[in-house]
Image: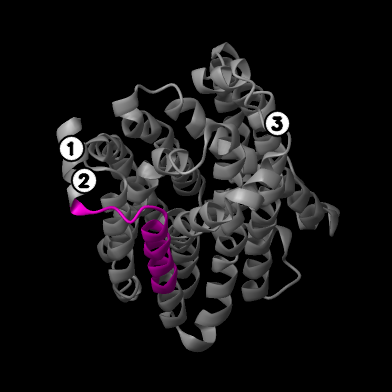
Amino acid sequence: MVTVAALVFGQLFFPSYSPLVGTLASFGTLAVGFLARPLGSVIFGHFGDRIGRKKMLITTLTMMGGSTFLIGLLPTYSSVGIWAPILLVLCRFVQGVAMGGEWGGAVLMAVEYAPKRTKGFYGSIVQIGCPAGLALGALMFYYSSSLLGEETFTAWGWRIPFLVSILLFFCGFYIRFRTAETPVFQELVEHGEIVEFPIVELFKNHSKELVCTALVYLASSTVPFYIAWVFLAYYAKTILHMDQTQVLMGMVVTNAIMSAIIIFIGKLSDRIGTEPILYAGCICMALVAFPVFWLADTTNVLNLWFAMFLVAAPLWCTFAVLPVFFSETFPGQLRYTGISFGSQASTIFGGLVPIFATAVVPQYGTWPVSVLFIVCEMLGILAVLTLRRPSARTFLVRARAN
């Protein structure tokens, strides 16, 4: 979705505008999904903490899979006029509501099943899905674009990945349907510890944790993700006029490499803790905020790929440890709602990053984007410090215990 929004949605669904405004409107459809995510996090978090993780995951998967498949069938502006962007926005809204409860539930299923000293490893397995899915999607767009040609790809080739996604939906549905409820939730039910209104309890007694969760997710996932894989792709193709297939291949190579590293990072977090990895990742992303655009501006393909990797490496390393870090932040009876709402609330801001970047670059260049990137990373570090404040001695003790 992020790839096609950056590359073709503007001209397909918003052709009556200038290319710049059309791209802004295209990124706006992404933002609609982010605005819907907190709503989904409250809905699915509430029932996930009250009636179980498994049922909510099946529901969110169905909504996500159905809306993604329907996007591949949507008519464009040239066929139905204003109804094309309206239908696209509706599909994005459903995706957003589903995603609001999807990620929190998925990581809980992994972490709450995991043995005590391997939670980082099990949680990182779930996180592989994001870079691997992005690499697979970009690969399908790459072959569609290169084999069909840019004109044919824009006409109908972009639909292929959306339609093929139905196969992944059936696989995911089968796996989740056969998976039992987590032991943690079963114990909560047995001990009568289910909370009637989880979101109310969170705001009343865990507001600091919610705010810090949002800031950590903003710094370690949302902002770097949409700078690297949405705006940078748009910037390279539209502003720098680089070849679309080269941009796509950079996304494939970078995310394929990082998919293999995420498991290692998860296992590492079981030995040294999640905090040092989050600190290191946020610091590295702040340091490369300016260099990534300097490299891209050379219009050299290898430099662009290296720029993508400079963001992707610390991004996916921090992303790998978020499941166990957030699971340890909230008590079991509030965990689904806490993780979901805390993380997805940050996407309201993060989803606006491509719009902000696209709007300011023509007049000011990329420096405002880099400054925004650095500020978000500093806020993420501050949030980790607020939640944990661990010492080096803590890390050594934990390492020896493992």
Label 3 SS: helix
**Crowd tier of the residue under label 1, counting other residues whose Cα lies within 10 Å: few below 14, some 14–19, many 20 or above:** some
Q: Are marks 1 and 3 in contact (CB under 8 Å)?
A: no
Amino acid type, label 2: Phe
Judged by depth in the image, the label closer to the viewer, 1 or 3, is: 1
**Crowd tier of the residue under label 3, counting other residues whose Cα lies within 10 Å: few below 14, some 14–19, many 20 or above:** many
* Left or right, 329 with reference to 394: right
Residue drawn at x 45%, y 46% as measured from the top left: 138
Q: Where's residue 63, x and y in %? A: 70, 33
Q: Where's residue 53, x and y in %? A: 60, 26
Q: Main secondary structure of the magenta part?
A: helix
Q: Nearer the viewer, residue 180 or 396?
A: 396
The magenta stretch spans residue 123: no
Residue topped by disc 2: 395
Q: Nearer the viewer, residue 179 or 389?
A: 389
Residue topped by disc 3: 47
Marks 2/3: CA distance?
Answer: 36 Å
Residue extent of the magenta highlight: 374-392
